[in-house]
């Protein structure tokens, strides 16, 4: 039997900074989006200045977006449950 030349080596290096990075991404990504939204609404539109307060929730909330997200998740769940091809 020939030895496998293309065998992957194990490494202790984690992607995205490991557990800390995986925790920080979902926390800081929405905060960054809200910060950039606030900065874009400011008169100077400068990233280096403190942004004005966030818009009221009525401006951030869109019922159509909620319906689209729930519909997309429902569609993906339905497609996941479809038995297409051989199931072993």
Image (cartoon, rainbow, N blue to C red):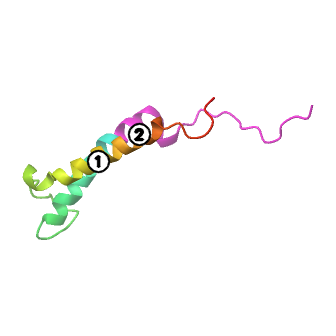
Residue in view at x 23 percent, y 48 percent: 67
Horizontal side of residue 26 vs 59, given as left or right:
right
Disc 2 vs disc 1: which is toward the camera? 2
Q: Are marks 2 and 1 in contact (CB under 8 Å)?
A: no
25, above or below 52, in the image: above
Task: Find out whether residue 65 is within the magenta segment.
Answer: no
Left or right of residue 88, residue 22 in this image? left
**Where does the magenta region start and end?**
1-25
Left or right of residue 77: residue 65: left
Residue 69 shows which numbered tag? Answer: 1
Q: Is residue 24 magenta?
A: yes
Q: Quadrant of residue 39?
A: bottom left
Q: Is 58 above or below relative to 15?
A: below
Q: Is residue 41 above or below residue 19?
A: below
Q: Residues within 10 Å of mark 2 (few under 14, many from 20)?
A: few
| Quadrant, the N terminus | top right
Looking at the image, tell me whether mark 2 or mark 1 is earlier in sequence order. Answer: 1
Residue 26, given in percent of the width and then of the height, sits at 33, 41
Q: Secondary structure at mark 1?
A: helix
At a point 78% along the width and 42% down the height, the residue shown is: 6
Q: CA distance from mark 2 to mark 1?
A: 14 Å
User: Could you say which quadrant of the image residue 20 lies in?
Assistant: top left
The picture places residue 34, in percent across and down from the top left corner, at 21, 53
Q: Would residue 74 appear left or right of 79 to someone viewing this image?
A: left
Q: Quadrant of the C terminus?
A: top right
Q: What kind of element bears circle 2? A: helix
Q: Residue at x 41, y 43 (%)?
A: 76
In the picture of the structure, the residue carrying the numbered disc 2 is 78
Q: Which residue in the rendered view is the most extreme toward the bottom?
A: 44
Q: Looking at the rendered structure, which numbered label has been put on residue 53?
A: none
Does residue 49 appear in the picture of this structure? no
């Amino acid at each position: 039997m020939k030895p496998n030349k293309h065998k992957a080596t194990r490494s202790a290096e984690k992607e995205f900074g490991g557990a800390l990075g995986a925790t920080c991404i979902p926390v800081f990504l929405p905060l960054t989006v809200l910060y950039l939204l606030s900065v874009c609404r400011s008169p100077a539109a400068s990233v280096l200045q403190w942004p004005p307060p966030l818009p009221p929730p009525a401006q951030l909330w869109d019922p159509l977006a909620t319906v689209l997200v729930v519909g997309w998740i429902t569609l993906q769940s339905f497609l996941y449950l479809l038995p297409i091809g051989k199931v072993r």
